[in-house]
Image (spheres, rainbow, N blue to C red):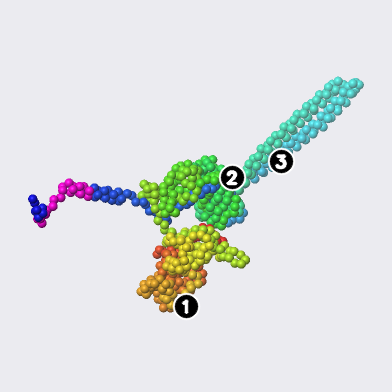
Amino acid sequence: MVSAATTATSPMDVPRVSRRRSRRRWAIVAVCSASFALFAWAFIARPSVPVVRRDDVVTDTVIRGDVPLLVRASGTLVPEHMHFLTAQASARVERLFRDAGATVRLGELLLTLSNPDVQTRALEARQRASQAQQELVSLRTSLRLQALAQEAIVAGLMTQQTAAVQARRATDSLAVGGYVSTTDAVNAAALSAEMTTRLRVERERLRLMQVAIDEQLIAQREQVAQLTAIARTQQDRLKAMEVRAPEAGVLQDLALQLGQWVAEGAPLARIVEPNRLKAVLRVAESDAPGVQIGQKVVIDTRNGLVRGLVMRKAAGAQSGVILVDVSLTSNLPAGAVPDLNVDGTVEIDVLRDVLSIPRPASANANSTMTLYRLTDRGRTGERVRVVIGRASADRVEVREGLAAGDRVILTDLFGDVRSLTPHPRFAMRDTTLIRLEGIEKLYHTEDVTTRALSSVSLEISRGEYVAIAGPSGCGKTTLLAILGLLDSPDAGQYTLEGTAVGTLSAAERAAVRNRQIGFVFQAFNLIGDLTVRENVELPLTYRHLSSRERGERVDAALDRVGLMHRAAHYPAQLSGGQQQRVAVARAVAGEPAVLLADEPTGNLDSENGASVMALLSDLHRSGATICLVTHDVRYAAHSERTVQMLDGCVLA
């Protein structure tokens, strides 16, 4: 019998592990490791969803309604009527009295030419014409004398013939009574017959002479007329050496130099009527079939729009385009002159009640294309197949793939973002700093309600310089007050850096205003009892910053506006321009997300105003987002984009 002591394991014993259990454990570890490696490889190898900056793409909304089918073409303004001046004879330029572009009167002398040969030929032609006229007079006189002599002969023969006839009659009477001999009677009859014959012959000679006289005079008169015409032509050519304006208008294409030799028929200049212009458009062959006479056209002169009608269409193409003449039915804007380049839009048809979007660059009529439709409130996009119908110059008909209200990306992502090609979806990174949607603002009094803002929608991106311009009372300052959280809209949504500020409390709005918005007012709004440094530092004291950090920010802001040397001065010791610079420094010291400037040059002269505008431009170039309110177009031109307002509405 074995005791318990002998069955216990001694300290020297080593427990054996089953080889089967060891293999199972290693197999489990290997499988787990392989699974983890496979999962990691799949996760790493899987292509990530691309991200697109919102500012890099153009988006728009699918709408339902009527779509005008438009054809766009470039062209020029040309006069409806022009008079070309050409050289009537080869000659040399002697004098120039007017330059190209001058307005000339009817009959005004423009230039003179000279050619001695023309003068010689004119004198010779006039001499030949005068000589032919003299010959005509001499011939008429000579022929008239011959005719008179023949008429005298005829008259004498008429008298003799009458006497012979009477004598014959008397002889015949006497012969019946036997008073004269038969011989006398026969002689009297013969004489009468002779005189009658001679009279007939001379009369025929007179008739033939008169016919010949008329023919000779006609021939001579024709020669005189020809020589006179030649002389007149030569005289006109000589007179044409003085080139005069055949009508009133503007002189163009006069590029002659003194002493220059011009050939006969060479163009000298042209005169046009600048107030009677038409547009000649160069329409592409592919667009030309839809253009018909009588269709409405809008001509863009870069300085205004002019309405017109198609009045002529060329029968053939030239270099791939067909010329279309447009008569202008409205008044031309200032600056519209002949040869001005213009753009024309022809309305060829209207599609009724269809879905449409602005025309993407790669869209063709009656085709299929791929677009990206925004989803998840614009945060992502998905690829959709869209069937395009008829296409206009700026919009295309959508037959399948989209619905009214869908927002799509019009930018060609396949060409611009190659990595998007295999992905059916992508993410949108929003760079919009400020977004206003349907903002309304009403002011109520006992008698009337004033609508200051009406359905204002606006987006401002980070780093953008935007000017809000318009006449007094259009709502600019009200809009700026809402942007700066100094006032609240009655309707609509205001989003600042992705936060809907309309739902914030008064304290939260004040905090946002202090940290994210900088103000530059027309009246400076500096505190007279504080120094420049203290005025700039004052808004920072509400941020609970350390004294050192506040000092660093104030120094940096004053250095940016060039007033570090005035830090210890009081506002009354500064000029208006310097006070406004202090206001700018106060606004930028807090490093706001956006700088709002309300007529910052309104209380400044032109020199200081230009200096402040240059400062704002420098701040923008360094990355600041600026929203400027102004009624001066000169200052609005400093911005990247101008938003026009009128009667509380955003026009552009």
- Which is more N-terminal, label 3 or label 2? 3
Q: Can residue 364 be seen in this snapshot?
A: no
* 1 or 2: mark nearer the eye: 1
Q: Is residue 339 left or right of residue 38?
A: right
Q: Magenta segment range?
A: 8-29
Query: Horizontal and vertical percent for residue 372?
Result: 43, 49
**What kind of residue is marked 2?**
Gly
Q: Can residue 425 be seen in this snapshot?
A: yes
The residue drawn where x is 47% and y is 41% is 366
Q: Nearer the viewer, residue 563 or 451?
A: 451
Does 179 appear above or below 85? above
**What kind of residue is marked 1?**
Gly
Asked if labels 2 and 1 touch by Cβ distance under 8 angstroms, the answer is no
Q: Disc 1 marks which residue? A: 528
Does 42 appear above or below 206? below
Point out which mark residue 294 bears.
Answer: 2
Query: Horizontal and vertical percent for residue 122?
Result: 59, 47
**What kind of residue is marked 3?**
Thr
Q: CA distance from mark 2 to mark 3?
A: 68 Å
Q: CA distance from mark 1 to mark 2?
A: 70 Å
Q: Nearer the viewer, residue 146 or 136?
A: 136
Q: Disc 3 marks which residue? A: 141
Q: Is residue 443 left or right of residue 132?
A: left
